[in-house]
Image (spheres, rainbow, N blue to C red):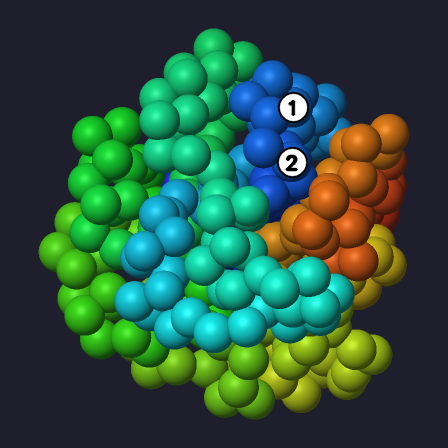
Amino acid sequence: MNISGVEIGKGHPCRTVFEISNSHNGDYERAVALIDAAKDAGADFVKFQAYTPQELVELRGDGPAPDPWGARGWSMRDLYEKAQTPLNWLPGLVAHCRDIGMPWFSSVFGVGSLAVLESLNCPAYKLAALDHSKRRLLWMVRGTGKPIIRSCASQHRPPGNDTALYCPPGYPQTPTSLLRPLKRYDGLSYHGTDPSVPALAAALDARMVECHVQLDDEPSELESNVCLSMTQFAEMVRQIRATEAWV
C-alpha cells in the first residue's frame, strides 16, 4: 500500500499513525497544534475522524451513552456531537498538513463525510472496528478506488487485500496476548496509555501502528484513558526506530 508516497508493508519501516480523534476538545486551534505535535513527534501520518452525528447514529444506533456520560443524561448522539471534528474544519486542517509536509488520511462513516473527504482528495480511508464489515459503507469506500485500512477485533483478520489492523477488545484495551492474532494482521490499532504496547507490536513485525494521542498539557476531555501523551508517542516512535536499527 502507498499513501501519499509513503510505502507500507514488508521491507519498509513500521508506519506510525497519530490519531487526533476528539483530542482537540472542540477547539480548531488545538487541532492544528495536534498536527504540529504529530510532525514534531516523528509520526508518519495524522489521521482524522470525519463524520456527522447522524451518520454514526445510522451506523451504530442511539440510546444512553456509557458512563460517566450516561449518568449525566447524555445519549449516544450527544456524545457523537461532543466528540466530532466538524467537517467544515477539514479544508483548513488538510491545508495545514500540506503546508508542513504531514501526510494524512481519515476514518469515514457515511455519505456526507465521504463527499467532503473526496473533495479534499483524501488519499486513503480507515474503517473502524465497529464498522469495517458494514457492507454499504465498505462498498461506498471501495468505489473511490483509494487504499482502505480496516480495524478488526476478531482473532481472525477479515478477508481481502485491505491493510488490516488488529484492534484488541476493550476501550481502553485490557492486557492481552498480541502474538497470535497479530501474526495474521498487518498492524495494531491501539487504545491505551502504555507506549510499550505499540512498540512491542512493531517489534513483532507490525507494519503500521495507530494510536490515539493527546497534548501533554491539554488532555482529551472524553478519551484521556485511551490516549498516549505527545511525549509518550514520541518515545514510542523512538523505540520503534531503535528496534528497527537492530533487527
Residue at image position (85%, 33%) is: 216
Q: Is residue 175 above or below residue 122?
A: below
**Residue 191: image x %, image y %?**
69, 62
Q: Which of 112 and 97 is in front in this view?
A: 112
Contact flag, marks 1 and 2 (Cβ < 8 Å)? yes
Identified by mark 2, the residue type is Asn
Residue at image position (78%, 83%) is: 176
Other-residue count near label 1 (Cα within 10 Å), few / some / many at <14 / 14–19 / ≥20: some
Q: Nearer the viewer, residue 214 or 73?
A: 73
Q: Which of 68 and 14 is in front in this view?
A: 68
The quadrant of the picture occupied by the C terminus is bottom right
Quadrant position of residue 94:
top left
**Residue 93: image x %, image y %?**
46, 22
**Mark 1 or mark 2: whose residue is earlier in sequence:** 2
- What secondary structure is marked by label 1? helix
Determine which residue is flagged by label 2. Answer: 25
Other-residue count near label 2 (Cα within 10 Å), few / some / many at <14 / 14–19 / ≥20: many
User: Which disc number belongs to residue 30?
Assistant: 1
**Residue 3: image x %, image y %?**
39, 41
